[in-house]
Image: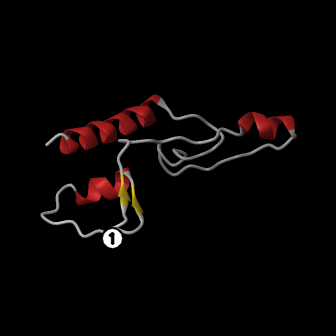
Amino acid sequence: MGDVAASGGYFIVMAADKIIAQPGTLTGSVGVVSGKMLTSAFWEQNGVNWDRISTSANATFWSNRQDYTDAGWAWLDSIYQDFTEKAAI
């Protein structure tokens, strides 16, 4: 690990027998954090219209013009559950 390792770095090394890190590496874990800035109201106020073409149900998961769907939240919850179960071992 380099200078800083957060949840992703922690998650990756959980299964390791040995971890190699720099002496000053700051390592922490906050679990799973996800977020995005929703900008649809901003675009509407400025007269900008958007169209989209999606190839799958989750193609717009990271779109900044719509919130997560219920299925998206469920997926994030499943990642958090997987992370906390592995971290508890």
- Residue 46 vs 23, above or below: the answer is above
Label 1 environment density (alpha carbons within 10 Å; few <14, some 14–19, many ≥20): few
Q: For numbered disc 1, what is the local secondary structure?
A: loop
Residue 81 x %, y % = 27, 36
Residue 20 x %, y % = 24, 70
Residue 21, located in which quarter of the rendered image? bottom left
Q: Residue lying furthest top in this view?
A: 70
Residue at image point 87% right, 40% down: 47
Residue at image point 63% right, 44% down: 64
Residue 40 x %, y % = 72, 37
Front-most of residues 89 and 25: 25
In this picture, residue 40 sits left or right of residue 75: right
In what quadrant of the picture does the C terminus appear? top left
Question: What type is the residue that disc 1 sits on?
Answer: Gln
Residue under label 1, please give it: 22
Front-most of residues 87 and 39: 87
In this picture, residue 57 sits left or right of residue 63: left
